[in-house]
Amino acid sequence: MTCQPEILSFNCPLPSEPTERIQLAHGSGGKQTEMLIRNVFFRYLKSEGLAQGNDAATLSPMPGAAKLILTTDAHAVSPIFYPGGDIGRLAVSGTVNDLLTAGATVNADYPLLITTGFILEEGLLIADLERVLASMRDCAREAGAKIVAGDTKVVEHGKGDSLFITTSGLGWRLPGPFAPDGARARPGDHILISGEIASHGMAVLCARNELGFSSQIRSDNAPLSEIVSALRSAAPGTHVLRDPTRGGLATTLNEIAIQSQVSIEIDETAIPLDPQAAVLCEMLGFDPLYVANEGKMVVVVPPEESPAALQAIRASRYGEKAVKIGEVLERQTAAVLLKTAYGTRRRLEPLSGEMLPRIC
Amino acid sequence: MTCQPEILSFNCPLPSEPTERIQLAHGSGGKQTEMLIRNVFFRYLKSEGLAQGNDAATLSPMPGAAKLILTTDAHAVSPIFYPGGDIGRLAVSGTVNDLLTAGATVNADYPLLITTGFILEEGLLIADLERVLASMRDCAREAGAKIVAGDTKVVEHGKGDSLFITTSGLGWRLPGPFAPDGARARPGDHILISGEIASHGMAVLCARNELGFSSQIRSDNAPLSEIVSALRSAAPGTHVLRDPTRGGLATTLNEIAIQSQVSIEIDETAIPLDPQAAVLCEMLGFDPLYVANEGKMVVVVPPEESPAALQAIRASRYGEKAVKIGEVLERQTAAVLLKTAYGTRRRLEPLSGEMLPRIC
């Protein structure tokens, strides 16, 4: 039994050009994030075994047996409470969903394991901390996860922002055909989405109270254990799972296209939009394809398993509105094409620059 | 094969009384930290399986086989560069040392695995980030660790403090007698320390340039893989390993006394002090027993293995000045006694309140 990294991951945000200082756009999840990873983080850490791609690292502690899945996420959302969630629910569900994208099993024998590091700003209301902890507890229970270790530091007032939470997750992928990976999309595969997009980013934006109006919009913030467990049974041949968080659906599809070296075409009219988010995006000029989600899964599945996959997702919590939104085309340039409502096609680029900072 | 938590850990800092807001003292690592953990974190997260004690959680994924060790630490040191180290070296060596305290093996087949979450403040010099990343790379190489996953978020200028790093670590404890645990100290055991104490906290304090004078003091910031590997061979019956970081040697010994329900007596004249730190502590009125270390190990070992343990540590990097500083007494009240230079005895309490904030 050895424990050597097999597939490694690094998802983070920084500099597109040799700019001298960190900018907010380096945290957007789009092109500048990608550049910072490549130009700065990789230069130092790649030699240690860090490679890019998936949202979780997959390791083989025992040849032929279960694979170990590791992931980490830093959370710095502002405000820390918003309709539909809070930084605690975000931290736990984000880590759970990243483990799930690598095919982690979740059941009583294999709970997902979570460690959590808190950076608290002096002056934080302890009642607020308690509300966040209760939310983490509830989300972990719902997700089939256990919080097994933690650490906290306190920084002076004005040197933080209420609280930051960094969560790491550990899961197991059991031997078998169910082994989703960002590099496994194949021509002909169907692209499914588990529900309506764009609510999380818009809900956080509204919660900032800077817009001068109120909205009923709620974040989709949720752990997707039930959807992925259902998929494991119904569509074991699933090729890719990816949660379209920072950078939105368009950026996530671009990541898959690049990792798998395929083109993807999605149908604009098929993409389910949160109705409240759609109105708000239109008013403010945001493209919902680039708005963060925190409770959605993109599923790339062979066509023969697509109907069963769709049925399984729809029968699961948070998956009722799942639909097919596109297909993987023949291999060519890695690209994402949007077939518009007018029948034209345009290329969807990954997010460039900063759209909404501090949403996850 | 199942994966159920066996021993779980939570080391963090928060409120001693029902104060309403987080205070700096909640981050000191002493009594107020302990109260916050008990009164706030445990109330919400204990039901999920979180229990206190060690700096790392030990899990049994495969009955009878290697145990999985998990740990996490948030790092918010100010300034981020100081003589002898920086926040990157601190983050990697701190996580490595916590894994080692649970008996993690480190070799080519079993590298320690590290995930890392960055919270970057807008405006951070990218050159500074690069210096930190290079330091993490070098420290990981030295320690036998691999950085396998990461994430980064960017916060607005004024909402952070240059950068915060949260690292999580995963290691394996192979089957065998070497199974250090904070609860295993036994009457008659010898207490060893791997070298001179008090340099880290004092080095960080000096680096703040608020004292009006300069000092040559350097932090001991180091990964202790070599010491623990040597101990595994030379003293497999080692009962406890613990790195005396936040709260210093006095607080660490109190933690061991409470976990093992024993009294500990240490000899003031035997405790090796960093000479520069000793001078500074005397000038400023600090007690070096409460000053943080970041490259020291407290070793509790049965008397028959004590000479071999001491020899092994002294032959290892960072262990040249190891000495015996005390013994575990017969079981009675869990307490730490200091035999002073004058032959009197006084009780050493854990750190109360805040001494030096933002040192780790």
Image: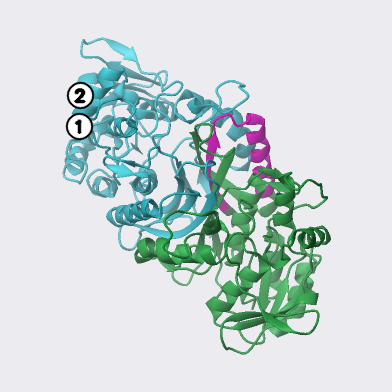
Chain colours: A green, B cyan
The residue closer to the viewer here, B359 or B264, is B359
Q: Is residue A61 above or below residue A112?
A: below
User: Is residue A1 at least partly visible in the picture?
Assistant: no
Q: Amino acid at mark 2?
A: Ala
Tally of numbered discs = 2
Q: Is residue B54 left or right of residue B296?
A: right
Q: Is residue A182 above or below residue A187?
A: above
Q: Is residue B340 above or below residue B40?
A: above
- Quadrant in the rendering for residue B44: top right
Q: Which residue is mark 2?
A: B270
Which quarter shows the N terminus of chain A? bottom left
Contact check, label 1 and label 2, Cβ < 8 Å: yes
Q: Is residue B99 left or right of residue A311?
A: left
Whichever of labels 1 and 2 marks the residue nearer the N terminus, that label is 2
Per the image, is A135 magenta? yes
Where is residue B126 shown, x and y percent of the image?
40, 55
Q: Chain of mark 2?
A: B
User: Is residue B150 at least partly visible in the picture?
Assistant: yes
Q: Amino acid at mark 1?
A: Val
Label disc, if present, on residue B323 of the rendered structure: 1
Q: Chain of mark 1?
A: B
Compute the Cα span from label 1 to label 2: 8 Å
Q: Which residues are magenta?
A: A113-140
Per the image, is A260 magenta? no
Q: Is residue B231 left or right of residue B311?
A: right
Mark 2 is surrounded, within 10 Å at the Cα level, by few (under 14), some (14 to 19) or many (20 or more) other residues, namely some
Where is residue B215 shown, x and y percent of the image?
22, 30
